[in-house]
Amino acid sequence: MKKFTAMLMLLLPFLAPAQNSNAPFPKDIFNNKQQVEQWLAQNNIPALGVGVISNGKLQHAQVFSATGKGPFADNAIFNVASLTKPVVAYLTLQLVSAGKWQLDEPLHKYWTDPDVASDPRHQLLTTRHVLTHQSGFTNWRYQQPGGNLAFEATPGTKYRYSGEGFEYLRRALEHKFNTTLDKLASELILQPMGMKDTRFYWDATMPENRFAVGYDTTGKAYEVGPKNTAANAADDLLTTIADYSKFLIAVMQGRGLSKDVFAAMTTNQVATSRGKHFGLGFEKYDFDDGVFALSHGGADRGVRTLAFIIPQTGQGLVIFTNSDAGNKVYEPLVQEYLGKYGKTIIEIETKE
């Protein structure tokens, strides 16, 4: 199955301006609901979910509906695309903290993809490589000639964003623990964190009437699908603003992680672009005062999502949209709700 995830270079969509309206995106959105809804309608974004974390607690969790497109409930369920990856990274780091998994143990001890079995480089691939996007794989195997998985670089030698790396890790975890990824996530993440509205795939419990169907930039709805029937480690998590905010708060607190593993997660592991780095599972922004932010984005057809946490200050921001045009809201929201650090993030993303 082809994926549409590009991750938008994580935050490159900050450069996308609103094109259907000269009016700026309203500030203090929670007190300007009508203006927000009008702006969303003018820019073909049917639904916008925003979670604001302050002092380590969720202060706001609200879904705005474009005028004429709602209402979407505050517990609307979004496909969050690559925001799946931090959840999988974090459950893996919990296993590392518990001594049940090793960051630098070769994954071939538990799983070898048949496509790369004859390539000796598969014996070098580790969890650290996957979580830092140094697996050596392209994003998706369908992008390769013949649709087969192949190494484009030796693991650990080059940064290249890869969903295939996370899927490789999933198979290794499932073989090691003789279970499925969604069951591991339920045990380590979803149940302990109270994420009752989060699932990895469509099943009989999925409330379809709450799903935020995706739209293109012209305001035309996409067909719903494909409806996954098994967990994907890199994509397609179904969740709500409140649930994902709970997850981010737990990450901010290092819940379930040893001090050493939390330190490794928040340490620069590999340079990406514009002076940024990946830690373990999150992209990292370093500010001049020693404070840092952890972030990840997501982009599929009809999906644009973004999340930030700043552990030292207890700040966080979650943005879900169900539109290819959803990136238009990123810049004003980051600046409004992450204060001086949000301004610096925008400066980092827009510099040459």
Image (cartoon, rainbow, N blue to C red):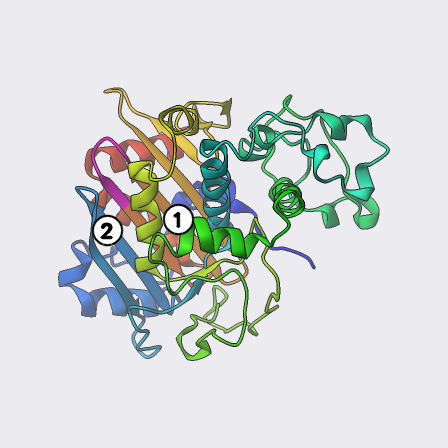
> Residue 90: x, y in percent?
45, 41
Residue 268's tag is none
* 319 part of magenta stretch: no
Looking at this view, is 83 or 250 the one in front? 250
Label 1: which secondary element? strand
Q: Toward which corner of the image does residue 29 lie, by quadrant?
A: bottom left
* Residue at 53%, 56% in the rendered image: 183
Residue plotted at (82% across, 42% down): 115
Residue at 54 percent across and 72 percent down: it is: 203
Amino acid on which the number 2 mark rests in the picture: Val
Verify whether residue 313 appears in magenta: yes
Which image quarter holds the C terminus?
top left
Residue 319 shows up from this direction: yes
- In this rendered view, identify the residue nearer to me: 33 or 206: 206
Specify the segment rendered in magenta: 310-316
Looking at the rendered structure, the secondary structure element under dot 2 is strand
**Relative image position of residue 106 (x, y in whole percent):** 67, 28
Assign the N terminus to one quadrant of the image: bottom right
x, y percent for residue 209: 42, 79
Residue pointed to by mark 1:
306
Q: Position of residue 204 (x, y in %)?
A: 52, 77
Mark linked to residue 52: 2
Q: Is residue 127 above or below residue 327?
A: above
- The amino acid beneath tag 1 is Leu
- Residue closest to the far left: 31
- Position of 107 with respect to 117 (left or right) is left
Q: Dot 1 surroundings within 10 Å: few (below 14), some, or many (20 or more)?
A: many
User: Do callouts 2 and 1 mark residues in contact (Cβ within 8 Å)?
Assistant: no
Task: Depth check: give the residue in front, 59 or 252.
Answer: 252
Question: Which of pointers 2 and 1 lies earlier in the amino acid sequence?
Answer: 2
- Decide which of 293, 204 is in the foreground and name it: 204
For residue 291, what is the image quadrant? top left
